[in-house]
């Protein structure tokens, strides 16, 4: 199982560490189109989505990543990564990768609360304990298509959703020691590999 982490901006090293702790055999940083070769899954970290989108275009990663999503390669977008993955962004008439059937609202938890932690119940995670989530200028999902499963809401806002091989979270799972969400994603990758 070879997983890539888009390494243009954001907490790349932390995602790599969490994936390794969650049991991934091989994790690579993706900076160039050739780094996408042979990947069984791709993680899109947080940061600033407009900047990451621009860099993806500049480094010629946008088209190949769109193609991979179409082929069904599992992808996990966290925070800005969720925005990159979604097909609609509130207040703008274009999207980035545009694969996840969801309308996202950026910086939607208010400017006065730039960041906070919350205990969440995310459907599908192993164990009973709540999942400690770190939100930083986080987006939320305003609307999802019929083919999307809502895995978690916080204050009536969708903060985790899955559509087949695509997973999106509003928060930063790489900034906590709890690797259950990374494990969940690796489970998706395993399932996808088994059906090829
Ligand atoms: N606010 C950022 C954006 O809109 C996302 C924040 C994050 O990834 N921590 O792109």
Image (spheres, rainbow, N blue to C red):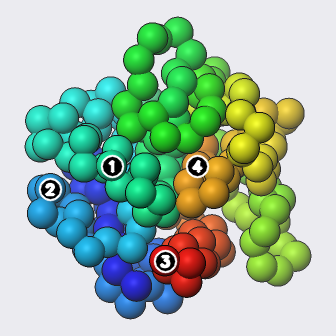
| Residue for point 12% across, 43% down | 59
In the picture, the disc for residue 196 is 3
Considering only order in the chain, which callout, 3 or 1, is on the residue closer to the N terminus?
Answer: 1
How many residues crowd mark 2 within 10 Å: few (<14), some (14–19), many (20+)?
A: some
Does dot 4 land on a helix, a strand or a loop? Answer: strand
Residue 156 picture quarter: top right
Considering only order in the chain, which callout, 3 or 4, is on the residue closer to the N terminus?
Answer: 4
Percent across and percent down for residue 27 are 32, 78
Left or right relative to 7: residue 89: right
How many residues crowd mark 3 within 10 Å: few (<14), some (14–19), many (20+)?
A: few
- The Cα atoms of the two marked residues, 3 and 2, are separated by 23 Å
Figure quadrant, ligand 1: top left
- The Cα atoms of the two marked residues, 4 and 3, are separated by 23 Å
Front label number (3 vs 2)? 3
Is label 1 in contact with label 4 (beta carbons under 8 Å)? no
Q: Report which residue position mark 4 lands on.
A: 168
Residue 7 picture quarter: bottom left
| Residue for point 63% across, 57% down | 164
Left or right relative to 36: residue 134: right
Q: Report which residue position mark 2 lands on.
A: 33
Check the image and report above or below for 149 versus 92.
Answer: below
Image quadrant containing the N terminus: bottom left
């Amino acid at each position: 199982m070879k997983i890539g982490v888009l390494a243009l901006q954001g907490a790349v090293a932390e995602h790599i560490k969490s994936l390794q702790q969650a049991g991934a055999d091989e994790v690579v940083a993706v900076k160039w189109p050739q780094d996408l070769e042979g990947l069984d899954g791709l993680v899109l970290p947080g940061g600033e989505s407009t900047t990451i989108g621009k860099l993806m275009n500049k480094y010629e990663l946008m088209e190949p990543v769109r193609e991979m999503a179409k082929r069904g390669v599992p992808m996990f977008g966290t925070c800005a990564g969720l925005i990159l993955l979604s097909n609609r962004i509130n207040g703008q008439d274009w999207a980035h990768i545009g694969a996840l059937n969801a309308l996202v609202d950026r910086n939607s938890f208010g400017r006065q609360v730039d960041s906070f932690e919350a205990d969440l119940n995310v459907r599908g995670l192993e164990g009973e304990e709540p999942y400690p989530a770190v939100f930083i200028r986080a987006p939320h999902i305003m609307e999802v298509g019929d083919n999307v499963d809502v895995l978690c809401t916080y204050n009536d806002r969708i903060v985790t959703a899955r559509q087949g091989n695509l997973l999106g979270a509003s928060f930063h799972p790489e900034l906590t020691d709890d690797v259950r969400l990374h494990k969940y994603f690796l489970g998706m990758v395993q399932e996808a590999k088994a059906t090829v």
